[in-house]
């Protein structure tokens, strides 16, 4: 998918007096969470939200000797840098909430259009779900007001509010737990609307999010995390997806909480192991992310935050007072962790490396992360203080993002004109020094390196489409922005599929892509693009006399007869098979030899699916029969899998070959001192 070049840059690329230009920036977007405040408040169910003035408002159910005599309290933090505002002594009991609350029923607080609402269940003297309100950012509170009383004196096992004058909760019913909700209509709260789905075996917390009239609920049954949706427009409940299915009763998953920032949802949930089955004892939060509340990442753990009743992630771009600055917080009762939010104007997080670039090389190959190697001039140790160390973060550190733009001086008068060609994650940093020179070598890979991470847990899927499964595997690896082709193959149903624990996500993704011959690459905007290759594609670029070095080759050692077998039919003869074949008759005539390739894929259930797979495999064999390599001037427009035309000079200068090929690999080399700016393309048949 060729990049678009501005007209002046296209003209400069065809000029004989090209002057290359580049821009290389580094930015540290990683949230380096570290302990920030340690109030040491005893563990309890809790929640937090951001008030309209930027203050942090927290609620919790202080525990007592009886689970029905807890106390509901609130805390307001205007300056997060002040330890006294987080202290245990800073909690204030809400009106009527002393010693009468269900301390195991969970609680919630949310900003409902400027009005703060806090929810918890009464435990003594009744079982009402109560709400307190604050119209002044948590300075004072009124209430309690009864929302409703769960039927049959039921106890609540989780509460959530999406910030739309709503409340959702898990409550006891015969056979387990049900999910219900109520909405404020301007004068009072609506009656209970209970879900129509089967009861849960247990309740371990609840989280909610809203988009229009559709609410997404994430609930725990103590061992798994699942979703359902509620459409407030028609009152319809629908089951959703399993975010973290239970595989054993060893690992508990409790107290889910949701937040939203920078276009992504973050789901925090406590993972706990008592050690009874595994011998391993822990209880810490795991943070998962999602773009659409359907596909979730495996996430990352915060082992330093030992907790029992959940963790709340809360980004605060502008605190109400003080000098804490823009930060993200992970709140537990005993400890608060925090990390600075990225600011492009912060010199400790962002840096222009362009003036120091001496040379670089970028490599792109299918099925592996693109790689960037950059050599910087570090004369006088000018970058020494900008390199991260443990606990002291600077722009040049592992996980930082390198953004490369390439181009030429273009226009009249000539001015630097370039386009972005890649984003990479810094993985290695080497100081290279001798008595004569001081250099810094950076090695980075694009974000598809996350596909080489191992799956923490096993996930099984039945009856999902290929498009759903590809989106799922990518999200599990933390790649949320993908582009899928609008082809019939993506809507094909895969009977069953498993992401195995301990398996690299790339292995799972490649297995899915190989089902129907898809390829993928990460573009300059970090969109993971999937393509179905076609021999009928129109070339996007043509090379003629500007080819500096040319190698054209072919091989007949390829299959010309493909036999694909899928899952045997469920009924009929026990000897029946599901197969299809594809043939390259011209190649058989050319070489006078049948070359077989057998392929078995139990994800294929019909002969038409097997025929499609056979056709893709035959096309793959035909492409691989042609292998070419050319060296040309750096062309920032070209990407993996683009089609190009090669027109070599006629004899006696050249071979006279006229070929249409596909880019199967590229290497860019730039060296300022040598005046080098070239691109080597590895090509295969179209």
Image (cartoon, grey):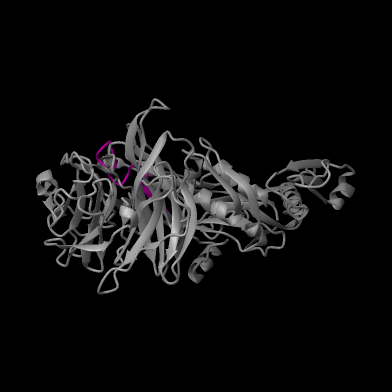
Is residue 565 shown to the viewer in this render?
A: yes
Measured as percent of width and height from the top left, residue 188 is found at 26, 71
Is residue 557 shown to the viewer in this render?
A: no
For residue 40, which quarter of the picture? top left
Query: Residue 656, relative to residue 432: is it above or below?
Result: below
Residue 244 left/right relative to 622: left
Measured as percent of width and height from the top left, residue 421 is found at 48, 56
Task: Identify the residue shown where x is 29% and y is 67%.
Answer: 165
Residue 494 left/right relative to 203: right
Task: Identify the residue shown where x is 43% and y is 63%.
Answer: 230
Figure quadrant of the C terminus: bottom right
Range of the magenta residues?
Answer: 387-403
Measured as percent of width and height from the top left, residue 404 is found at 43, 54
Q: Is residue 395 magenta?
A: yes
Q: Is residue 86 magenta?
A: no
Measured as percent of width and height from the top left, residue 52 is found at 20, 65
Residue 296 left/right relative to 656: left
366 and 166: which is toward the camera? 166
Q: Main secondary structure of the magenta part?
A: loop
Query: Residue 147, relative to residue 107: is it above or below?
Result: below
**Residue at the farthest bottom position:** 186
Residue 533 left/right relative to 149: right
């Amino acid at each position: 998918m060729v990049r678009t070049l501005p007209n002046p840059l296209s003209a400069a690329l065809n000029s004989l007096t090209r002057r290359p230009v580049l821009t290389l920036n580094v930015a540290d977007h990683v949230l380096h969470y570290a302990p920030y405040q340690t109030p040491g408040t005893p563990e309890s169910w809790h929640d937090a939200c951001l008030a309209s003035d930027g203050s942090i408002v927290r609620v919790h159910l202080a525990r007592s000797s009886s689970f029905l005599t807890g106390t509901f309290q609130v805390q307001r933090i205007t300056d997060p840098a002040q330890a006294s505002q987080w202290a245990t002594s800073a909690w204030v009991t809400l009106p009527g909430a002393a010693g009468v609350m269900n301390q195991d029923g969970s609680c919630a607080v949310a900003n409902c259009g400027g009005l703060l609402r806090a929810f918890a269940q009464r435990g003594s003297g009744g079982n009402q779900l109560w709400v307190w309100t604050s119209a002044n950012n948590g300075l004072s509170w009124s209430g309690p007001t009864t929302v409703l009383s769960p039927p049959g004196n039921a106890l609540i096992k989780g509460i959530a509010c999406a910030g739309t004058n709503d409340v959702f909760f898990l409550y006891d019913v015969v056979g387990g737990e049900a999910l219900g909700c109520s909405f404020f209509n301007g004068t009072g709260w609506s009656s209970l609307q209970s879900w129509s789905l089967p009861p849960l075996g247990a309740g371990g917390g609840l989280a909610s999010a809203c988009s229009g009239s559709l609410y997404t609920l994430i609930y725990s049954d103590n061992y798994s995390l699942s979703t359902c949706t509620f459409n407030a427009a028609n009152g319809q409940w629908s089951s959703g997806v399993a975010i973290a299915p239970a595989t054993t009763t060893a690992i508990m998953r409790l107290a889910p909480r949701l937040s939203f920032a920078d276009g992504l949802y973050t789901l925090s949930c406590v993972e706990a192991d008592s050690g009874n089955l595994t011998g391993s004892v822990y209880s810490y939060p795991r943070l998962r992310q999602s773009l659409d509340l359907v596909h979730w990442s495996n996430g990352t753990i915060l082992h330093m935050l030992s907790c029992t009743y959940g963790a709340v992630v809360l980004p605060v771009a502008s605190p109400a007072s003080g000098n804490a600055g823009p930060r993200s917080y992970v709140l537990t009762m005993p400890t608060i962790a925090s990390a600075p939010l990225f600011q492009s104007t912060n010199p400790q997080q962002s840096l222009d490396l362009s003036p120091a670039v001496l040379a670089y090389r970028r490599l792109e190959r299918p099925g592996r992360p693109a790689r960037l190697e950059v050599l910087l001039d570090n004369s006088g140790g000018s970058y020494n203080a900008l390199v991260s160390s443990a606990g002291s973060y600077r722009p040049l550190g592992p996980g930082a993002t390198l953004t490369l733009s390439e181009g030429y001086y273009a226009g009249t008068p000539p001015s630097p004109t370039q386009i972005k060609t890649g984003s990479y994650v810094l993985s290695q940093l080497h100081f290279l020094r001798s008595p004569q020179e001081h250099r810094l070598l950076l090695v980075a890979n694009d974000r598809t390196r996350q596909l080489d991470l191992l799956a923490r847990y096993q996930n099984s899927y039945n009856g999902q489409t290929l498009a759903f499964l590809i989106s799922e595997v990518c999200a599990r690896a933390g790649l949320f922005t993908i582009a899928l082709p609008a082809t019939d193959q993506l809507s094909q149903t895969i009977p069953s599929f498993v992401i195995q624990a301990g398996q690299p996500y790339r292995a799972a993704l490649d297995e899915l892509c190989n089902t129907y011959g898809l390829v993928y690459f990460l573009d300059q905007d970090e969109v993971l693009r999937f393509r179905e290759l076609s021999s009928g594609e129109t070339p996007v670029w043509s090379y003629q006399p500007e080819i500096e070095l040319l190698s054209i080759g072919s091989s007949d050692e390829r299959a010309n007869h493909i036999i694909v077998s899928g899952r045997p039919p469920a009924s009929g003869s026990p000897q029946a098979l599901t197969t299809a074949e594809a043939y390259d008759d011209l190649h058989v005539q050319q070489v006078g030899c049948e070359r077989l390739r057998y392929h078995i894929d139990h994800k294929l259930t019909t002969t038409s699916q097997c025929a499609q797979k056979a056709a893709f495999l035959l096309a793959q064999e035909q492409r691989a029969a042609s292998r070419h390599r050319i060296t040309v001037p750096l062309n920032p427009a070209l990407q993996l899998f683009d089609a190009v035309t090669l027109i070599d000079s006629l004899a006696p200068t050249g071979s006279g070959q006229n070929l249409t090929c596909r880019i199967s690999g590229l290497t860019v080399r730039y060296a300022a001192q040598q005046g080098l700016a070239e691109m080597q393309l590895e090509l295969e048949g179209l």
